[in-house]
Amino acid sequence: MGSNADPTDLLPERSVRSLEEYLEMQAAVGNRNRFEILYRLAHTDELTPTELDSMIDVDESTLHYHLGKLREVGLVEKRARSERDSDGLSTHYRATIPGEVILEHGVEELLRREWDFGDAYDSSAD
């Protein structure tokens, strides 16, 4: 890449999202709570807020705030599901494909590489 490199050149000609939208996705997982929520959703089929709440050490309003942020940028989707032995619908969340991809090729990839190439990640070793 030369000095005229433009980040928008990374987008396909008919991209479904703008560069700004992709950057918003990346920024969303930069928050520890949102990363943990997305990680847990990406590694399960889907979870209810109650199930997530039992796994993550945040209060209920904080959990819903971060779920909303993840939904807003398209990393998580919400759906109502009828449960057997239940009188109504329950809300379930799951990671979207972009949510799974941003984890797989983002922070998770960096962590895997640190396991394999730990010395290269240690800038204080010089």
Image (tube, rainbow, N blue to C red):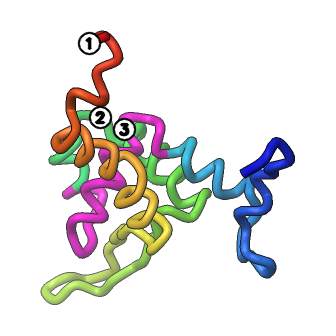
How far apart are the two marked residues, 1 and 2, measured between alpha carbons? 36 Å
Q: Quadrant of the C terminus?
A: top left
In the image, residue 110 above or below residue 49: above
Marks 2,3: beta carbons within 8 A = yes
Residue 125, by quadrant, is top left
Q: Tell me the residue that label 3 is attached to.
A: 33
Q: Earlier in the sequence, mark 2 or mark 3?
A: 3
Where residue 106 appears, x then y in whole percent?
Answer: 42, 51
Query: Residue drawn 53% across and 60% down?
Result: 71
In the image, residue 61 above or below residue 122: below
Looking at numbered disc 3 in the image, what kind of residue is underneath it? Asn
What number is the disc on residue 58?
2
Query: Residue drawn 73% across and 67% down?
Result: 11
In the image, which residues are magenta?
29-51
Where residue 96 appears, x then y in whole percent?
Answer: 45, 72
Looking at numbered disc 2 in the image, what kind of residue is underneath it? Val
Taking depth in this image into account, of 117 and 77 the one nearest to the observer is 117
Taking depth in this image into account, of 70 and 20 the one nearest to the observer is 20
Q: Between tags 3 and 1, which lies in front?
A: 1
Q: Tell me the residue that label 1 is attached to.
A: 125
Residue 73, by quadrant, is bottom right
